[in-house]
Image (spheres, rainbow, N blue to C red):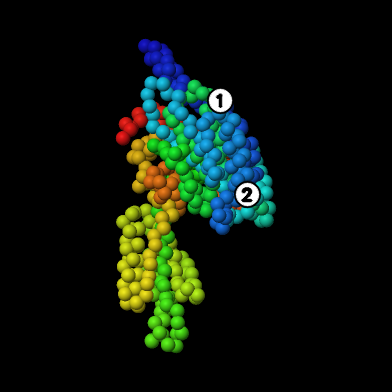
Amino acid sequence: MKKTLVFLAVLSFLFSAPAAFSQNRLAQKYRAQMIPMFVRYAQVGSMSDDNAEWMTPGQEKMANMLYEEIQAFGFPTHFSDDKYIYVNIPSNLKKRQAPKLGISAHYDTTPDIIGEGIKPQVIKKYDGKPIILQNGHVIDFESDPYLEKMIGKTIVTSDGTTNLGADDKAGVTIIMTLLKTLAENPKFPHGPIDIVLTPNEDVGRSAERLELEYYNPDYAFDFDAGVNGEVIIANFSADKILVTAQGVNGHQSYAATNGYKNSVKPIADLVSVAAKTEDLPNYSTGEEGYLEPHHFVYDPEKNTTTIDFRVRYFDQQEGKKYFDNIKFAADSLSRALDVSITVQLIKQYENVEYGVKPEAKDIIAAAMNEAGVIADFKKERAGTTSAMIMAKHGFGGYTVFTGQVNPHNFTEWLSEEDMFKAYEVALNLIKQVAQRKAEPTK
């Protein structure tokens, strides 16, 4: 009887496991290609620039290279004038319709640190010793506790004279490997998939010229987070509130009779009234928001003074409170000082939590579980590509780990294992979404 039960258990495993086993074996086939691909991408300097009208030459070079490679995969692809690369893969499911999956990453790197002439160093079977880079930079367990988990594994660093660009060339590598997998395995079941590679994420503009004709998924996942199953499921909303006081020019000595109005005083009063000490970022942690008077601009010829308030919040009501307080103070001061004061709200990025379908969390958790990864759901006191898309187009998405550590830093490094695991998660996302039923068209 015991032998029979064991035999039945083995049979049950063999009939239930083939799909997962087959998918894991498929993923392993592409693993060795990922680091050489990443190194090649990292060596292309593609820094974005706050002061550029749009593209930098390095970004354009990177975009052209990626587009040429993607074309070879044979999927419908659109390369916009603004250098967004869209891949629209039609469903290969024959008997039913599935929701549309969206996957994104950005190919620019930060302008905050040198990103030209990158020399990636691939360290195989890391021995646990401090990694000494040029210019006195060191990566060790004290500065990077996660590094200890990489003993015996492969990591990639820069030589210390630049950053590495794993933010977000790791995400780009994951997507390019995914596209290659789908192209070479056309029977892999999938619903419709929209993929976009964007410029200018590191200057907050990755959603600015996004075209919904080519990227408008039901479930969106951006591959641009850290390590070890990290998934950003909520983030700060970010507003810029510009308040401008318009003075009246004239000789100050005769201001009592000639109508001269000072524009600096109303703004100074506004800051003292609307930006309370307890609202400053110094007193904000966790999911608490903040209001910061960021910088002044005074134009003596026009006699205008502008204050740029930086506002961050998770809760929409908290954000509304900050804006309402500023608007009320501005209107009151305008009347009291007889000076024109305008208030302008500029939405920079939005909390993705406001626009994500509830089941998205279950989808990514299942995809990670299948890859042997425990989902580490986090709320980020910053913004993401998904947050920029949320602000501009109203749909949110989660940001998924890629293996990048210490972004925007000379000591940035990449975990090969985590990058590969993230690629497995992407494959599993395709399967998870394909198993769901598409919502009826409205």
Indicate which disc residue 57 carries. 2
Which amino acid lies under the numbered mark 2 shown in the image of this protein? Pro
Judging depth in this view, the residue of 401 and 221 nearest the camera is 221
Of helix, strand and loop, which one carries label 2? helix
Q: Circle 2: is it few (<14), some (14-19), or many (20+) Cα within 10 Å?
A: few
Q: Which residue is mark 1?
A: 184
Residue at (66% x, 47% y) in the render: 118
**Residue 414 coordinates in the image, percent (x, y):** 58, 43
Q: Is residue 38 visible?
A: no
Residue at (39% x, 60% y) in the render: 345
Residue at (48% x, 31% y) in the render: 89
**Residue 405 coordinates in the image, percent (x, y):** 55, 47
* Quadrant assignment, res 254: bottom left
Please tell me whether residue 238 is drawn above or below residue 398 in the rendered image: below
Residue 288 appears left or right of 187: left
Of helix, strand and loop, which one carries label 1? helix
Q: Is residue 80 visible?
A: yes
Question: What residue occupies the far front of the structure in this picture?
Answer: 258
Please tell me whether residue 395 is drawn above or below residue 1 in the rendered image: below
Judging depth in this view, the residue of 207 and 430 nearest the camera is 207
Which amino acid lies under the numbered mark 1 shown in the image of this protein? Glu
Residue at (41% x, 50% y) in the render: 391
Closer mark to the observer between disc 1 and disc 2: 2
> Which image quarter is the C terminus in?
top left
